Image: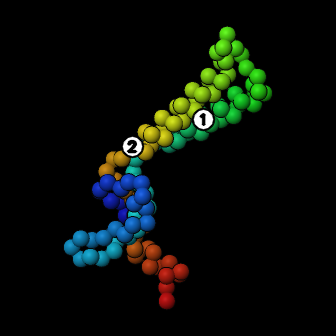
Amino acid sequence: MVQVDGSVNAGNSGASLIDIETGSVLGIVTRKGTGLTRLFHELRETLKANIGFISEQAGGGGIAFGAFNVIDATIANQYHILSLLSEIERQANVGIGYAVSSDHLLAESAFSP
């Protein structure tokens, strides 16, 4: 992997990483660095598990206070947090990206003559 000290954004994957002095292709951009840790991704999975568990336990029922259904509100809250996590992940960019080295790609048997 080649670490790129530059902004890589959604849609850049698959683009050539070019040496501006020589015009040579150094690699293919694969992803951006976000600075988000494994715990961030674990939180997303926990929220999904919460939604599944609450839905399963409720069995289509609910706990209501007047027109307010606690089960539906809790599930909606979990979905709202998931949506917020997606926005944080989309916006997170530490100015670092990653690319697969062209030397590595050329060494692959699929690209050998």
Question: Counting other residues with Cα less than 10 Å from the Cα at mark 2, is it few (<14), some (14-19), or many (20 or more)?
Answer: few
Whichever of labels 1 and 2 marks the residue nearer the N terminus, that label is 1
Q: Which residue is mark 1?
A: 46
Q: Is residue 49 above or below residue 3?
A: above
Residue 46 in which image quadrant: top right
The residue positioned 49% from the left and 82% from the top of the image is 111
Q: Residue furthest front?
A: 67
Q: How many residues crowd around disc 1 within 10 Å: few (fewer than 14), some, or many (20 or more)?
A: some
Q: Is residue 33 left or right of residue 81?
A: left
The Cα atoms of the two marked residues, 1 and 2, are separated by: 21 Å
Closer to the eye: label 1 or 2? 2
Which quarter of the rendering shows the N terminus?
Answer: bottom left
Mark 2 highlights which residue? 91
- Disc 1 element: helix
Q: Residue at x 53, y 81 (%)?
A: 109
Q: Position of residue 41 (x, y in %)?
A: 52, 42
**On screen, 89 above or below 112?**
above
User: What kind of element bears circle 2?
Assistant: helix
Taking the image as drawn, is residue 70 in sight?
yes
**Residue type at tag 1:** Thr
Relative to residue 12, is residue 69 drawn left or right?
Answer: right
User: x, y percentage for residue 88?
Assistant: 43, 39
Q: Quadrant of residue 67?
A: top right
Q: In screen coordinates, is 20 left or right of 31?
A: left
Where residue 69 sits: x, y (%)?
Answer: 67, 18
Name the one closer to the observer, 67 or 87. 67
Which residue corresponds to the image point at 39% horizontal and 43% vertical from the top-left?
91
